[in-house]
Amino acid sequence: MKIQPNIYLAIGVLTGSAMLISCSSKQDGQAQQQEVPELAVITVGEEDASLETGYPATLHGKNDVEIRPQISGFLTKVNVQEGQRVSAGQVLFTIDQVQLQAQVDAAKAAIAVAQANVNTAKTNADNNKILLEKNIISASAYQTTVDALNAAKAQLNQANAQLVSARKNLSYSVVTAPTSGVVGTIDFKEGALVSPQTLLTILSNNGDIEAYFSLNEKEIYGLTQDGKISMSEAMKTLPPVTLLLANGERYGRQGKIISISGVLDPTTGSATAKAIFPNPDGLLRSGNTGQVLIPSMQRNAILIPQKATYEVQDMKFCYVVGDSSKVHSTPIQISENNDGQNFIVTGGLKPGDKVVVEGVGISVKDGMQIKPKK
């Protein structure tokens, strides 16, 4: 019996269809395998957590002194540069001394004249005393010469006072550093007219640097254990603090909180705190900014990375890996204290739970299956 060509065609079509179905099934299976993402997870447990809370801070020298002239005049010399470290007594600025020196010279001349007048008046008074004793002149005539002598002495004293004042003004023409420190901005140059109202510069004594930051009312209550202990007692138990510089680096020397204001700012509800840091190398400057990092210790805490959480309507969630490696969105409660990288979980998780730490908020969905990786 002969097989017709159309029979061969039908057999070929059936065979091809079977092969296509087989290949499609394999590709679907491979695609399903490829759709299961491999994501990093951690197994949470209890541990002692030491976290640091950062507070924005402004730095000031321990003693910032405003340098102002005590007289008016033209600057003839600026003896220092901005940022220069100076010692107490070092000359900072010089003001025109010509007129001031002339006043000193004039005062000296006035003293010479006044002294001559005193000498003349004294001679007259001495002579008239002899004449009075011989009854040659009257007592009133003698008293006139005595009064003239007293007036001449008063003029001499006045001339001496004017010389002291002139010399003092001349000394004011040389502006010196009242303390050691670093010179701040200098806005006035040589030739500028200055007066006692002129701020020449600010001299920062930055051997120690003070960092000012704010604590809110709740944090104040926390420090005092809700008022159970005094603020002075609370400060004695505070640990050393660290300064995080504006460039993200940690300052190499630890500081200590030395004061917390007893009055809350009514506009912000916060109190001003002050920490002091040693600054022997002069690395820190008055006006710098940073963060004061205050450490806190919590025993037997569950710690998870902040990147493992997401937020919905002010509530925190994370993905917990359950049976068949499926993830479940789980609400958690966290402590307010954190270091910017980790959260302390106070509710919603238990030791041994596996939490997804990769792709949260991007690719992970509730109920999806994953391939956990450490």
Image (spheres, rainbow, N blue to C red):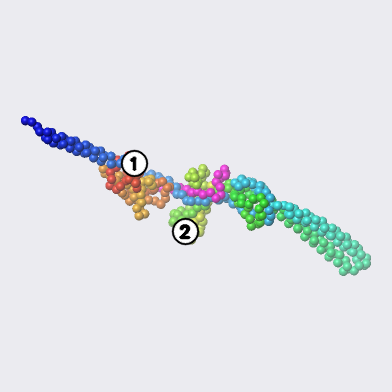
Q: Nearer the viewer, residue 82 or 340?
A: 82
Q: Quadrant of the C terminus?
A: top left
Q: Nearer the viewer, mark 1 or mark 2?
A: 1
- Is 272 in the magenta? no
Residue in the image at 55% along x and 46% along y: 284
Q: Is residue 164 above or below residue 249?
A: below
* SS class, disc 2: loop
Where are the magenta residues, as a range?
279-298
Q: Amino acid at mark 2?
A: Gly
Q: Is residue 188 above or below residue 35?
A: below
Q: Nearer the viewer, residue 183 or 234?
A: 183
Residue 347 showing in the rendered view: no
Q: Nearer the viewer, residue 110 or 130?
A: 110
Left or right of residue 111, residue 356 in this image: left
Residue 159: quarter of image: bottom right
Residue 129 image position (x, y, % from top left): 89, 64
Q: Nearer the viewer, residue 139 or 53?
A: 53
Residue in the image at 79% along x and 61% along y: 155
Q: Which mark is residue 40?
A: 1
Left or right of residue 81, residue 54 in this image: left
Residue in the image at 41% along x and 48% along y: 298
Mark 2 burial class by Cα count in 10 Å: few <14, some 14-19, many 20+ = few
| Earlier sequence position, callout 1 versus callout 2 | 1
Where does label 2 land, which residue? 269
Q: Amino acid at mark 1?
A: Ala
- Is 284 in the magenta? yes
Q: Quadrant of the N terminus?
A: top left
Residue 136 showing in the rendered view: yes
